[in-house]
């Protein structure tokens, strides 16, 4: 499993170790080169000192003042070694420390020797120094006194001086060891510091995770506080709160559905059971005919509810495939209107339905008919007796819209977002069994299957309006009518006589 | 025993009210919360059967207002809401029992009987007064080994007097607990019922178990006077 803490620790540790190793190596190499250069300069100085001890006399004989060579660098465990050669390659002098061993033959140029095999079996560094031995004051005077032809020429000598850089090696070893120890200490410190820092830095994340763990269906009201979180986590916190909002809304919707469904299913069953039990217990008082009528009504009510629920479920599962074709929307509206209006004639409500004589839309008649029927039935069912229903089809060459509005005193703007939820009813008591709150859910499900969506709004005068838009069927030459016939609009109107007179009086007063 | 049924389903109203009346209860019925609150506040009931989802005033609000006004009538919530949260809320709001729809009518009856007994501080369903035994669960009264033929209203009268045996019960109280709003008891209907009951339960030639306290009411004596 990926771990931020582990990842950060390893990354930071690797980075710190790599950088410190590089810095240590650079420091070591730099110090070593400086120390070796210093050592080589010391060797050169020593070589010059040895060369200074070589002199020549007036006869050209060379002499090494060896008494001076008894200096401390030619003694001890790690002495210096030298050999002096003439230009002809003849060994002139050699240090007594060499014993029977030799130093490598020098070339003809002055240069440092980086690796020289020493008599003690170790390797050291050396230097090659060329010089012309000088004459002391007396010999110099004798040489000057001689005629030029009798004075032997001064020879060019090559001095090879070598020594084991023991002190240098020790210094470098101490430096290297110190750097390694410092590196290891740095690594350990880095691991500790990074672990602590990362652990501390991840505390808000762990707290957030703990809070999230504690959230269940019963605590969806919980919201994460941004104030206590670092800036990096605040956007995540905002997203989590949004997610919780959506989850809470979904759970609330689910709970409403469950509660409403329970009521809609349990109540008729309770009615049936109580009616049957009472009739069986007191058969002499039972009214079989009345009971049968009630039972049938309950069965019809439950059948309608289950059928509607199944239709909605089939639509939502994508099992309903619309067979699109030309459908006369105006004719469907007329049919549905004529079906529902007679049952409401006795009520004191104004009902107007206006539409062109033909509006051919691209739809499926088997879905569109129940959709329109539910809309009109719903409008008649929920309009109060002093209210008004308006059903209208408006059409252009390409689109047609069916809009049904009705007086509705109880609906509020915030109710509109629940209007298509199955079983939702404005009346929380759910009194009355003829409507159970599935009509508009079915309308929405069918509309989706037909590729459109119903839009709802509360108009400025407090009326509830639902509108659905359809694509018009493309015109075909051999079928009529080809396009919406809006020249002859049809108006189906029902105005109760008492309200008709009120409207007339109102119109007169307006005039 | 008098019961108030607050239920908005007309079919359930009819069935439950019929069953309760046939079981000897006086039943008042209403379909909305506001009217239910009015009934409960203006009458004395032994038990209130209360639906939660009611028009005008929901059941929980009704119950809350009843308890706030110190009404101690036992309330049985009868609802389709079946979650644990709903039950807990109902009981914590002040109901004494909770029954989920659909229900067995016998269970509803048994719960109503239990609440009615509790209202009068009686634990057992069988009440004994002298030789008279009243089984409130079976709705049967016996005099010794013989079952008494009592119409529901006389049984209710005997049950009510037995539950309050030893204390004087006024005619008004009897009317309030035995007759519902639909009945229109005449001024002497209680006296007539008491007279009829006496004929059935009193020992022949002996003193009556139901004593009249003039100007006050009746008292059922636990022991023969």
Image: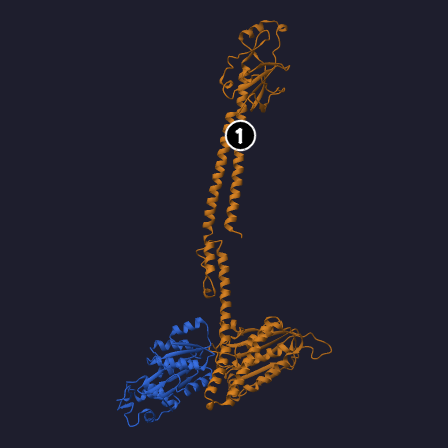
Chain colours: A orange, B blue
**Nearer-the-camera pick, A481 or B141:** B141
> Residue A394, image x and y in percent?
61, 77
**Nearer-the-camera pick, A405 or A48:** A48
**Nearer-the-camera pick, A505 or A155:** A155
Callout 1 crowding tier (Cα within 10 Å): few <14, some 14–19, many ≥20: some
> Residue B165, image x and y in percent?
30, 85
Quadrant of the rendered structure where residue A307 is?
bottom right
Tell me: residue A231, above or below residue A325.
Answer: above
> Residue A142, image x and y in percent?
57, 5
Tell me the subunit letter for badge 1. A
**Residue B52 visible in the displayed image:** no
> Residue A131, image x and y in percent?
58, 16
**Residue in view at x 49 percent, y 90 percent:** A287
Quadrant of the rendered structure where residue B118 is?
bottom left
Q: Name the residue under label 1.
A: A32
Left or right of B160: which side holds A34?
A: right
Total numbered badges shown on the rendered structure: 1
Left or right of A159: which side holds A75?
A: left
């Amino acid at each position: 499993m990926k771990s931020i803490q582990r990842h950060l620790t390893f990354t930071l540790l690797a980075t710190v170790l790599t950088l410190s190793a590089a810095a240590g190596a650079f420091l070591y190499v730099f110090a070593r080169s400086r120390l070796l250069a210093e050592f080589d300069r010391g060797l050169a100085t020593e070589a010059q000192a040895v060369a200074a001890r070589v002199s020549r006399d007036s006869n050209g004989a060379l002499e090494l003042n060896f008494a001076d060579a008894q200096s401390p660098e030619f003694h001890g465990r790690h002495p210096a070694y030298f050999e002096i050669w003439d230009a002809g390659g003849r060994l002139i002098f050699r240090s007594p420390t060499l014993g029977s061993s030799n130093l490598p033959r020098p070339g003809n140029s002055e240069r440092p020797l980086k690796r020289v095999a020493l008599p003690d079996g170790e390797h050291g560094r050396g230097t090659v120094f060329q010089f012309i031995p000088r004459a002391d004051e007396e010999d110099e005077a004798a040489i000057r006194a001689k005629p030029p032809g009798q004075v032997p020429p001064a020879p060019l000598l090559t001095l090879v001086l070598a020594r084991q850089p023991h002190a240098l090696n020790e210094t470098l070893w101490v430096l290297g060891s110190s750097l390694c120890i410092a590196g290891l200490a740095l690594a350990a410190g880095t691991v500790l510091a990074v672990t602590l820092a990362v652990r501390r830095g991840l505390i808000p994340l762990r707290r957030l995770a703990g809070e999230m763990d504690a959230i269940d269906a019963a605590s969806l009201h919980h919201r994460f506080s941004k104030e206590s979180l670092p800036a990096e986590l605040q956007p995540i916190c905002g997203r989590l709160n949004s997610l919780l909002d959506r989850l809470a809304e979904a759970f609330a919707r689910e709970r409403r559905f469950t509660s409403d469904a329970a009521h809609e299913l349990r109540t008729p069953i309770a009615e049936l059971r109580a009616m049957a039990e009472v009739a069986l217990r007191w058969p002499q008082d039972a009214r079989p005919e009345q009971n049968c009528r009630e039972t049938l009504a309950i069965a019809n009510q439950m059948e309608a509810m289950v059928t509607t629920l199944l239709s909605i479920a089939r639509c939502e599962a994508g099992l309903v495939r619309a067979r699109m074709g030309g459908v006369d929307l105006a004719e469907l509206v007329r049919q549905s209107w004529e079906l529902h209006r007679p049952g409401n004639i006795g009520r004191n409500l104004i009902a107007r339905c206006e539409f062109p004589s033909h509006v051919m839309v691209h739809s499926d008649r088997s879905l569109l008919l129940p959709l329109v029927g539910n809309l009109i039935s719903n409008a008649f069912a929920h309009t109060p007796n002093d209210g008004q229903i308006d059903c209208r089809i408006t059409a252009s060459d390409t689109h047609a819209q069916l809009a049904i509005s009705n007086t509705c005193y109880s609906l509020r703007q915030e109710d509109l977002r629940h209007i298509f939820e199955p079983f939702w009813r404005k009346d929380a008591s759910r009194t009355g069994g003829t409507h159970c709150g599935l009509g508009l859910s079915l309308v929405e499900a069918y509309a989706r299957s037909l590729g459109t969506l119903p839009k709802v709004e509360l108009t400025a005068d407090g009326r509830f309006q639902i509108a659905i838009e359809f694509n018009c069927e493309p015109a075909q030459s051999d079928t009529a009518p080809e396009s919406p016939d809006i020249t002859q609009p049809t108006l189906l109107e029902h105005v109760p006589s008492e309200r008709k007179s009120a409207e007339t009086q109102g119109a007169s007063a307006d005039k | 025993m008098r019961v108030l049924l607050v239920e908005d389903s007309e079919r359930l109203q009819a069935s439950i009210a019929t069953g309760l009346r046939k079981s000897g209860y006086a039943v008042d019925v209403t379909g909305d919360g506001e009217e239910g609150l009015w009934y409960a506040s203006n009458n004395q009931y032994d038990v209130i059967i209360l639906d939660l989802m009611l028009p005008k005033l929901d059941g929980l609000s009704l119950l809350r207002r009843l308890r706030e006004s110190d009404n101690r009538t036992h309330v049985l919530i009868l609802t389709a809401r079946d979650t644990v949260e709903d039950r807990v809320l109902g009981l914590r709001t002040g109901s004494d029992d909770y029954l989920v729809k659909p229900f067995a009518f016998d269970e509803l009856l048994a719960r109503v009987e239990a609440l009615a007994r509790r209202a009068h501080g009686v634990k057992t369903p069988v009440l004994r007064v002298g030789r008279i035994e009243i089984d409130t669960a079976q709705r049967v009264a016996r005099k010794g080994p013989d079952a008494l033929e009592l119409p529901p209203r006389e049984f209710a009268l005997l049950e009510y007097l037995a539950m309050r045996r030893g204390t004087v019960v006024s005619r008004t109280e009897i009317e309030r607990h035995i007759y519902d709003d639909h009945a229109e008891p005449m001024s002497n209907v209680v006296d007539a019922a008491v007279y009829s009951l006496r004929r059935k339960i009193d020992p022949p030639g002996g003193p009556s178990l139901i004593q009249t306290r003039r100007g006050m009411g009746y008292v059922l004596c636990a022991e023969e006077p």
